[in-house]
Image: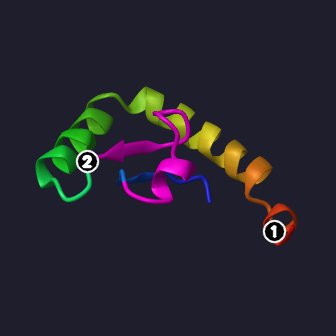
Amino acid sequence: MEKLLVAGDIGGHRELIQGCETGVLFQAGNLESLAQTRQELLRNPDPVQQLVKRGNAWVSQQRSWEKIVR
């Protein structure tokens, strides 16, 4: 869907979102961490587009229905 992934660093999120390569993780349950993450993304919009592209490419390659069914 070509959207930026921002999620708490719990469970499967850590598998899907890899260290600012395919999205951004914040400390789960910590509103301050979420707010800081949001502010950083708003201040630096150029890297956001790269994250969106890399995240979309990763999902297309690693999470296709064909691969999930296997």
Q: Name the residue rendered at 33%, 28% in the picture.
A: 44
Mark sitting on residue 65: 1
Disc 2 residue type?
Gln
Q: Residue furthest bottom?
A: 69
48 falls in the magenta region: no
| Residue 48 % position (x, y) | 45, 36
Classify residue 63 by image quadrant: bottom right
Q: Name the residue rendered at 25%, 48% in the picture.
A: 27
According to the picture, the residue beneath numbered tag 2 turns out to be 27
| Residue 24 % position (x, y) | 41, 42
> Counting residues from the N terminus, which is met first, the one under dot 2 or under dot 1?
2
Whether residue 4 is situated above or below residue 51 in the rendered picture: below
12 falls in the magenta region: yes
Secondary structure beneath dot 1 equals helix
Please give left or right for residue 13 compared with residue 26 in the image. right
Q: How many marks?
A: 2
Disc 1 residue type?
Trp
Mark sitting on residue 49: none
Q: Nearer the viewer, residue 13 or 58?
A: 13
* Disc 2 packing (10 Å; few <14; some 14–19; many ≥20): some
Point out the stretch of residues depicted in magenta: 10-26
Classify residue 1 by image quadrant: bottom right
Q: State the quadrant of the C terminus.
A: bottom right
* Disc 1 packing (10 Å; few <14; some 14–19; many ≥20): few
